Image (tube, rainbow, N blue to C red):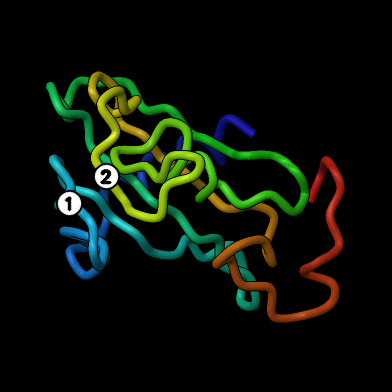
Amino acid sequence: MKFAAALLIGCAFAAPSADLMPNLPDAPPFTTNTYSGYLTVSDTKSLHYVFAESEVDPANSPVVIWFNGGPGCSSMLAFMQENGPLCIDDGEDYIKTNPYPWNQRLNMLWIESPAGVGYSHAGTAQDLQTNDML
C-alpha cells in the first residue's frame, strides 16, 4: 500500500500539462494550478483525479489524498461542496470561491474510487468487483 500511495503522489506532481484545468464553465478561476485527468490502474481501469496545488508553497506543502468513500460516492462531492477551492452551497445554484479550501496550506488530490464511481472508468464487469484488496 505504501508503494501505491507513493505512486499516486508521484503522478500528482507529474501532472501532465494537458490535464491543467484553469477554470470550470460559469465559475471563478482557480487560484492555483489545478489538474483533472485519469490515473491508469490497468488496461481496462482508470481512476479520475483532481489535484489542486497549495496556495502557499506547493513544492514543500504536504499532500492530502481524499477518497470520499463508498463504494459509490464520488470524491467530487468533497471537491465541490466540502474542501475544494470552489463550492456550491446548499440551496444555491452557482459556483463560487470557497473561502476556506484545504489547498490553502496543502496540496489536495481527490480520487474517485473504485473504478466505475463518478468519472472513473471500469471497462469490464470484473473491474466493478471490489473489496478491501481490489
Query: Residue at left 69%, top 67%?
Result: 116
Residue 117 lies, with reference to residue 112, above or below; the image says below
- Is 10 situated left or right of 23 in this image? right
Query: Residue at left 47%, top 33%?
Result: 82
Tell which of 83 and 105 is nearer to you. 83
Give the residue type at disc 1.
Answer: Pro
Q: Circles 1 and 2: CB distance less than 8 Å?
A: yes
Give the residue type at disc 2.
Answer: Lys
Q: Please state the horizontal and vertical placement of residue 51, each as a whole percent of the image.
A: 34, 46
Q: Please state the horizontal and vertical placement of residue 7, each as a whole percent of the image.
A: 46, 44
Quick one: quadrant of the N terminus? top right
Query: Residue at left 37%, top 42%?
Result: 87
Say what secondary structure mark 2 lies in: strand
Residue 96 lies, with reference to residue 62, above or below; the image says below
Residue 11 lies, with reference to residue 121, above or below; the image says above
Q: Please state the horizontal and vertical placement of residue 132, each as a whole percent of the image.
A: 83, 40
Residue 53 lies, with reference to residue 130, above or below; the image says above
Question: Which residue carries the number 2 mark?
Answer: 96
The reply to whether residue 129 is visible in this rendering is yes
Query: Residue at left 33%, top 54%?
Result: 94
Question: Which residue carries the number 1 mark?
Answer: 28
Q: Residues within 10 Å of mark 1 (few under 14, many from 20)?
A: some
The reply to whether residue 8 is visible in this rendering is no
* Displayed quadrant of residue 86: top left
- Is 5 situated left or right of 27 in this image? right
Q: Residue furthest front?
A: 91
Q: Residues within 10 Å of mark 2 (few under 14, many from 20)?
A: some
Whole-angstrom CA distance, mark 1 to mark 2, is 6 Å
Q: Earlier in the sequence, mark 1 or mark 2?
A: 1
